[in-house]
Amino acid sequence: MAATASFADLLAQYDRSLRAGDIVKGTIIEVRPKEVLVDIGGKSEGVVSASEFENFSDVKAGDIIDVLIEKAEDREGNILISKEKAEFRQNWDRIQSICNEGGTVQGKVKGVVKGGLIVNIGVEAFVPASQVDILPPKNLLVYVGNTYEFKVVKLNPERQNVVLSRRELVEAERNARRTALLTEMVPGDVRKGTVKNITDFGAFIDLNGLDGLLHITDMSWGRLSHPSEMLRVGQEIDVVVLDINREKERVSLGLKQKLANPWDNIEGKYPIGVRVKGKVVNLVPYGAFVEIEPGVEGLVHVTELSWTKRIAKPSDVLKQGQEVEAIVLGINREEQKISLGIRQLETNPWDLAHEKYPPGTNVKGPIRNLTSYGAFIELEEGLDGMIHVSDMSWTRKINHPSEVLKKGDMVEAVVLEVDKANQRISVGLKQLGEDPWSNIDKFYKVGDLVSGKVTKLASFGAFVGLQHEIDGLVHISQVSEDRVDKIKNVLKPGQDVTARVIKIDRADRRIGLSIKAANYSPEQLKAEQAVLDSLKPGEDLVALEHAFSAAEEKKASE
């Protein structure tokens, strides 16, 4: 009897009328790859797409589900049903209640649409991209399939649509965590964080609710040009809390503080005189910085690059990234400075210069450079000798070395002095020969008739080049018996003249000549010499040193 009643009920169910808009229970009679076949007691079965199930893999035949009849029968006699729309209508009252209370709802992200996400909360709801997280995500697809808590921010009963926000909940949760972190955090704590943003001066680290600044100077004990050399956005790191400003909600963080300061025992690791290896990390006009270990750099001053080479700037001999060896010259731990030297790897040639070039040694080499006061002769690579203008001639006053030398000339000279302290070797040209004034009587005597060429004119007379590289001076009063107002009216440079030696002063290295006395008798010579001897000191320009100086001054003023 019971079985008969049950059959009757079943028959009545199949005979019931199905109307569009009704929600009825149906039994899944077949599970297909992309849909299920549902028996709702009609003449034919309805089909529900797999996309309408939250976990389609768990669906099996025999499951009973609620479906909404969209159309009792289409042209082909099929019943159109929807599981989602049934759930939507059933959940709508619940959603309205939540919205009115300003509550939250849990939902699973179903897919990505233009401008945001579609979330299943029992009904389909929309989450704008700007409301997904605190920062608008670059890729919304990473949220698909995940379940989150959302706040209902807008409900339209007429259109039956819902707008949600996850950002408000994330912000609230983050604010709570930030408050907790600021309360419990103390300097010295080690915290996990994620690199949120990188700038030229450092990186901002998300401490799961609170952002902290990791300054570039606190990233490494070593040299760092840019934070991106160490960090990347999204990277998880452990950082040390250095300082907290609770009022301004600012936290300073450090990375290098997790490691020992390499300068703490620097004197023990690198005693003065020890040889070290390192890499050139920076070149500046005054030297090169060499990293000998992470966080420890030494400076090789430009003067410590070579004993002998004149290096204008370090980049002339070193390159960025080059591996070099050096000697530790000094350490200042307080200022974190190490002085290094590269030239100390080799023997200082000046230590051997005194033995190699003792005074009196004859040397030979090219003229490397000329200056206003002398010339430099290259004795060996990087080692020069200096020839002062006063050591170029025994007899001539050399005003500029270019009068007797030019760059590239191969010359011989004599070493006069080695000054190791000032790294200077003095050499001379005139010392190769004998000073003619030491034996002037062998060459010239008063009364001798001599010949020569006029080499220079001055207002007071003319200089005549004689043998043995000696110059004599013909005073203007000794040119002619007639009065001479201007010497250039009677004599020209290069002119051959014959004159009489009328005065020799060995102490002052002077030779006085007289052209007009070339044919004088001995008595006339004595009289003329008396006239010269009676000249006032200011007029006594026979002295070659004074005469040359006066001639130069005169030439400059003309």
Image (tube, grey):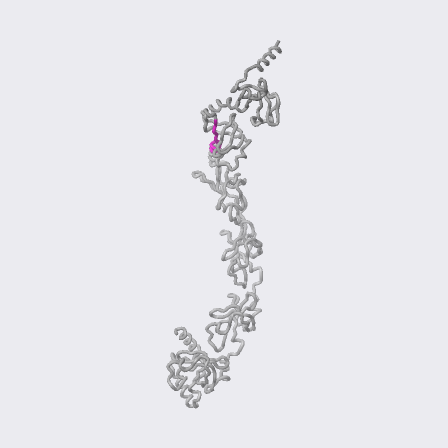
Residue stretch in magenta? 161-171
Residue 102: x, y in percent?
45, 27
Residue 121: x, y in percent?
51, 27
Magenta stretch contains residue 164: yes
Residue 548: x, y in percent?
43, 76
Which quarter of the rendering shows the N terminus? top right
Q: 435 or 482: which is nearer to us?
A: 482
Residue 436: x, y in percent?
50, 80
Q: Residue at x 48, y 69 (%)?
A: 371
Q: 367 or 443: which is nearer to us?
A: 367
Which quarter of the rendering shows the C terminus? bottom left
Q: 422 or 461: which is nearer to us?
A: 461
Q: Residue at x 62, y 11 (%)?
A: 3
Q: Would residue 529 be found to the left or right of residue 197 on screen?
A: left
Magenta stretch contains residue 94: no
Q: 462 or 271: which is nearer to us?
A: 462
In the image, residue 257 above or below residue 373? above
Q: Residue at x 58, y 69 (%)?
A: 356
Name the residue at the front extreme.
Answer: 75
Can the viewer see residue 396?
yes
